[in-house]
Amino acid sequence: MKKNLSKKLICGLGISVLSYGSAMAQMTLTGQVRTRSEYRAGQGTLQLSGDEPAIFTSQRTRLNFGYTGYRFKFFTAVQDVRVWGQDASTINRTTQEALNGLMIHEAYGEILLNDTAPLSKIENLSLKIGRQEIAYDDQKILGSLDWLQQGRRHDAAVLKFANKGWMVDLGVAYNQNKELNSYNRYNGVPATIATAGTNTISATPAYTAGTNGIGTMYKSFQYLYIGKKFFFGNGSLLCFKDDFNKTQTIAGANQVIGGEWSRLTTGAYLNAVILKKFTVTGSAYYQTGKDKTGRNLEAYLGSITTSLQLGRKLYIGPGMDYLSGDNGTRVMTSDEKSRRFDPLYGTPHKFWGFMDYFYVASPFGGQGLKNYFFKIKYKAKDNLTLTVDLHNFAAANKVSDGKGGTQSATLGNEIDFTANYAMTKAVSFEFGYSMMSASSTMASAQVKNVKDPEKTAQWAYLMVVIKPNFMPAK
C-alpha cells in the first residue's frame, strides 16, 4: 500500500514537473529600461535668440509577458514613461493626471485558425485582437514609432495570412471615448463638454488637424496589406482608409457633429538587392477622399533610397523623398483640393531628420517637403556602428513672402550623427548629435513662424537601453 502510494506520488510529481516545464517553455517574460538624456537648443523648431537650452532625462520602463497555448497566443506590455524629477521624491500627489505615464502599451490575443484541416497546410492564419503595434515595410506609412518613448499602438483587429512567401493582413479599428447608449461621436483628443438641448456633444479645443497624432485622431480605419518575398527582396501593396468625425465651429469651439470624412491612401513599396552589394528601396503613395478638416484631397508621396556596400564595413547611398503640398502664395477656397500629403501613422523621425522638424509635433506650413539626403554607415566592430546622415530640405511648393510674392523654397540643411554600441545582448548605448542650419524661409511666418530665431540649431542625446530576458521561450 505504502509502495503504491509512493509510486503515485512520484508519478504525480513527475507529471507536474513535466507540465510546469512545458508551460514555462510557452511563456516569455522580458523587460526594458530606456533612459534618454537630451540637450535641446532648437530641436523640433527654431529656438528664440537668447533662450537657454533645455536639458532633461526621460525614461521608458516596460514589462512584456507572452504566453502560447492551444490555438492561441497572449501578449501584454505594460509601460511607464516619465521625465526624471516629474514626481515628488516621497509622494506622487503633485503629479497631474495628464502626466501619469503608466499605461498598457500592448494587450492582445491571437487566435490561431490553421491548426485543423483543411487549413493545417497554411503557414499562418490567425486573428489578432486588441491593443497592438501595426508596422509594415520601412515604417514610413505605418510604424511603431519606437523612437518616441511612449511609442504608438492601435486598438484593432487584424486577420493575418502567411504562406509560401505571401503575406496578407486585413485590419479594422473603431474608436469610442467611452461606453455609450446613443451617438457615435468621437473627438480623439482631450475634450470639454458642450450641451445642446438634451444631447451631449464632445467639443474639442481648436487644434489644427495634423499628422502622427497632432489634433484629431481617427474614428475608424480599415486596411488591406499584401506583401510578397522575392529572391531579390520584397514588395508590398497597401490600401488604407481612415475616417474622422465631422466637425464644425459652434459657439467658438470646434465641435464634433454627426457623419464622417474618409481618406484613402494607396501605394506600393519595393526593396531590391542588386548584385548583392547594392540595395534600392522605393515607395509611392497616393491620397484621395477628404482630409481631417473635410477638404477634398489629392496628394502624393514618392521616395527612393539607395545603399552601396563598399568593402565589409562601409555603406553609402543617396536618396530623395517628395511629399506634395499646397501653393502657399494663395488662399485656397473651400472647394479646392488639398495637396498636402499626410504620412499617416509612420515613423517620421527615421526619415525626415532626427531633429524632428517635419511631420511630427511642430507644424511647418502646408507646402509639402523635398528631402535630398546622403547616408553613410560604418560598422567599426560587430557591436559598434557609426552613421552620418546629410539632409537638404526644401518646400515642395511655392512659399509666400507675406507681401504678395514668393520666397526661397530652401528650408535648411541638417547633419545627424549617431554611434551605437552593444556592450552585451541586454545592454546597449546610443549617442547622437544633430545640427540644423536653417534658412530665413524656415523661420518665416509661413513655415515655423519664429521671430528673431537662432538659425543654427543643435540637439544631442545619450540613450542607455537595458533589455533583460527573464524567461526566454525554449
Image (spheres, helix red, strand yellow):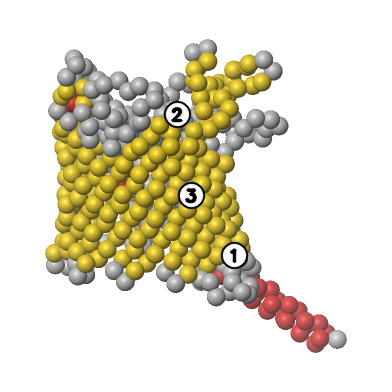
The picture places residue 362, in percent across and down from the top left corner, at: 33, 30
Q: Residue at x 50, y 21 (%)?
A: 248
Which circle's residue, 1 or 3, is located before the other in the chain?
Answer: 1
146 vs 42, left or right, is right
Marks 3 and 2, the one that precedes in the sequence = 3
Q: Looking at the picture, how far across and down is residue 307, in whole percent?
A: 20, 58
Find disc 2 in the rendering and name its residue.
Answer: 294
Q: Amino acid at mark 1?
A: Leu
Camera-side mark, 1 or 3: 3
- Closest to the observer, 27 or 90: 27
> In this picture, is 439 found above or below 419?
above
Q: Which residue, given by chain and number where applicable, does mark 1 sit on?
A: 112
- Tell me whether the residue at label 2 lies in contact with that at label 1, contact meaning CB atoms closer than 8 angstroms: no
Mark 3 vs mark 2, foreground winner is: 2
What residue is pinned by disc 3? 223
Where disc 1 sits, the SS reads strand
Q: CA distance from mark 2 to mark 1?
A: 40 Å
Name the residue: 68% across, 79% down.
14
Q: Is residue 195 visible?
A: yes
Q: Residue at x 59, y 33 (%)?
A: 177
Q: What kind of residue is marked 3?
A: Tyr
